[in-house]
Image (spheres, grey):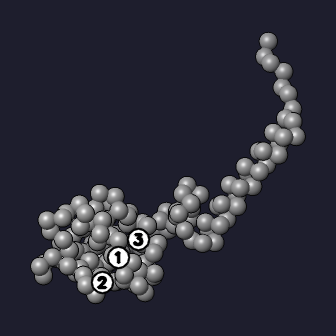
Amino acid sequence: MPPSPRTLGPLARAWRLLAMLLAGATVVCAQIMHSNDLFPFGALDQFSSGTDPDGEVVNTCLLGVRDGESIDIAFGSGTVGIQRAEMENQLELVAADPSLLAPLVVTYDAAHPETPLDALVLCQRITPLRAGVPHGEVRLVEVARWEAGA
């Protein structure tokens, strides 16, 4: 015989209501702030729209400069301590204040002490599309540059 259902007491109801209100408020705040910092309640805007098949694909990238030569640096905890999506959410701030790239350089140099960076460039590779396929020259646009000793 199955157990008989019982009703929730006032404390259980209040706790569930509070949890639901907190989760809802977190989602609303993340949408208003347009931030993924409150994951999994964040805006998750990277999934909100598609790419025009005759448009452009914009890929945020990092270039390290060492002895005048550029090297591609991958985003991640093992390289610069930040993921690409996190940086993309802060592009305007970093463009306005390139010194915000300095902690990334410190993290990178700690992992590569034998080859420290002279500069770090936050950039975007822009790939034009035609019918959803890469078509034409890829452009590299510099968003911000941090220089050692600057």
| Residue named by callout 3 | 87
Q: Is residue 93 visible?
A: yes
Q: Earlier in the sequence, mark 1 or mark 3?
A: 3
Residue at figure coordinates x 28%, y 79% from the top left: 121
- Seen in the picture, residue 33 relative to 19 is either above or below; the reply is below
For label 1, the crowd category at 10 Å Cα-Cα, with few meaning under 14, some 14 to 19 and many 20 or more, is many
Left/right placement of residue 99 relative to residue 112 reads: right
CB of mark 1 within 8 Å of CB of mark 3?
A: no
Q: Which residue is mark 1?
A: 101
Q: Residue furthest top?
A: 1
Residue 106: percent from left, percent from top: 29, 69
Q: CA distance from mark 1 to mark 3?
A: 10 Å
Residue 112 position in % (x across, y down):
19, 63
Which numbered disc, 1 or 3, marks the residue closer to the eye? 1
Q: Residue at x 34, y 58 (%)?
A: 77
Residue 71 picture quarter: bottom left
Q: Which mark is residue 23?
A: none
Q: Residues within 10 Å of mark 3 (few under 14, many from 20)?
A: some
Location of residue 51 in the rendering, given as x and y in whole percent from the top left corner: 42, 70
As drawn, is 83 to the left or to the right of 106? right
Does the residue at mark 1 contact the one at mark 2 (Cβ under 8 Å)? yes
Judge the density around disc 2: few (<14), some (14-19), many (≥20) Cα neighbours within 10 Å. Answer: many
Identify residue for label 2. Answer: 145
Going from N to C along the chain, the mark reached first, 2 or 3, is: 3
The amino acid at mark 1 is Leu
Residue in the picture at 85% in, 28% down: 6
Front one among 57 and 60: 60
Callout 2: SS: strand
- Mark 3: amino acid: Met
> Which residue is pictured at 65% across the width and 60% down the height?
26
User: What secondary structure is marked by label 3?
Assistant: helix
Check the image and report above or below for 35 versus 91: above
